[in-house]
Image (tube, coloured by chain):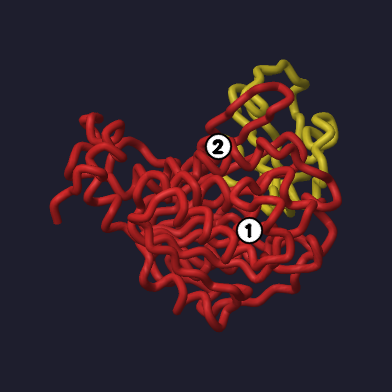
Chain colours: A red, B yellow
Amino acid sequence: MAFTNEQIERYSRHIILKEVGAKGQKKLLNAKVLVIGAGGLGAPVAMYLAAAGIGTIGIADADEVDLSNLQRQIIHQTKDVGKPKVQSAKETMEAMNPDVKVITYHEFITSENILDIIKDYDFIIDGTDNFPAKFLINDACVMAKKPFSHAGIIRFQGQLMTYVPGQGPCYRCVFKEPPPKDAVPTCKQAGVIGAMGGVIGSLQAMEAVKYILGVGDLLTGYLLTYDALKMQFRKVKLPSDTHNCAVCGDNPTITELIDYEQAECDGVGL
Amino acid sequence: MNITVAGVKKEVADGLTVAQLVIDEKVETPEYVTVTINDDFVDHGQFEGTVLKDGDTVEFLYFMGGGQ
């Protein structure tokens, strides 16, 4: 596949980087990334991936755009209120970059459909807002041997980690079970600064791009935490012994996907 | 003795347990925090019985569920 003149110009700031080059840009154009959740995290992730020329971007979300989303979910515009988020996200990505093929999944991810949805993708982004979905994505990615980026945001804080099969702990190594419903506050209950999705979501997009290019060090084995009020990032090393994990350990006790009770956040799953 | 908690070095009393440290550090939702000491996870059932040693590095990892 040869680049068109337009592509050479569009991706010139990538191609000039020795870590990317024409070869790396082709890898990006041939890559398939799935973004689960088209919200505060998913919006900036999807936009940066589209702008970067990720050739196939899947986007999954069962929700419609609400006016209260627009304070942070920058992929959606005021005119999109009421529209399925995946449709609005697709329109924005396609307008940004005609090289990108966007596949939409206007549905909740469940134990029934997730393995089928993730199977064709090279890298998965967890941009969901609830623990049942986060544990489901983790377990499915471990079982299907797919790399993924976990992230969470609340108030002035954010966190992320990257899972690559065989290269360090999974989300369940760190957090064994979802907390009971309403035990830990959600964004709707506690609020979140809009730019937090931009900070953490952009880092998730960066991890996906680095994974596809095969450059640098990923956040495997670490949890990166960000405290905006203290303006402090911390890269916290996670224990390296994953042998006892219930899903990615040597003798897993979780061998089938679990649909935990949905925590309340906007009344929907994703 | 000296330990490092969430990246900050502090002097604490000898014999300090993880359970007491969680209280002293005013950990939010302590029932759901993940604690690591050096390169190991500490199960919640071991908080009372785990006595910190000089030079230990302790981290508190919190559930963060938002995203939408």
Q: How dense is the environment of label 1, judged by Cα within 10 Å: few (below 14), some, or many (20 and up)?
A: many
- Residue type of the residue flagged with mark 2: Leu
Residue A224 percent coordinates (x, y): 55, 37
| In the foreground, A7 or A157 | A7
Residue name at image x 75 percent, y 29 percent: B15
Residue A34 percent coordinates (x, y): 46, 62
Q: Which residue is denoted by mark 1 in the rendering?
A: A128
Residue name at image x 60 percent, y 29 percent: B57
Residue B11 percent coordinates (x, y): 72, 16
Which labelled disc corresponds to residue A224?
2
| In the foreground, A270 or A102 | A102
SS under mark 1: loop
Residue A37 percent coordinates (x, y): 60, 60
The residues bearing labels 2 and 1 have C-alpha atoms spaced at a distance of 17 Å
Would residue A3 appear left or right of A43 to someone viewing this image?
left
Residue farthest left in this picture = A2
Would residue A95 appear left or right of B19 to someone viewing this image?
left
Q: Circle 2 marks a residue in which chain?
A: A
SS under mark 2: strand
- Residue type of the residue flagged with mark 1: Thr
Q: How dense is the environment of label 2, judged by Cα within 10 Å: few (below 14), some, or many (20 and up)?
A: some
| In the foreground, B42 or A258 | A258
Residue name at image x 59 percent, y 60 percent: A88
Q: Circle 1 marks a residue in which chain?
A: A
- Quadrant occupied by the C terminus of chain A: bottom right
Q: Is residue B36 above or below residue A117?
A: above
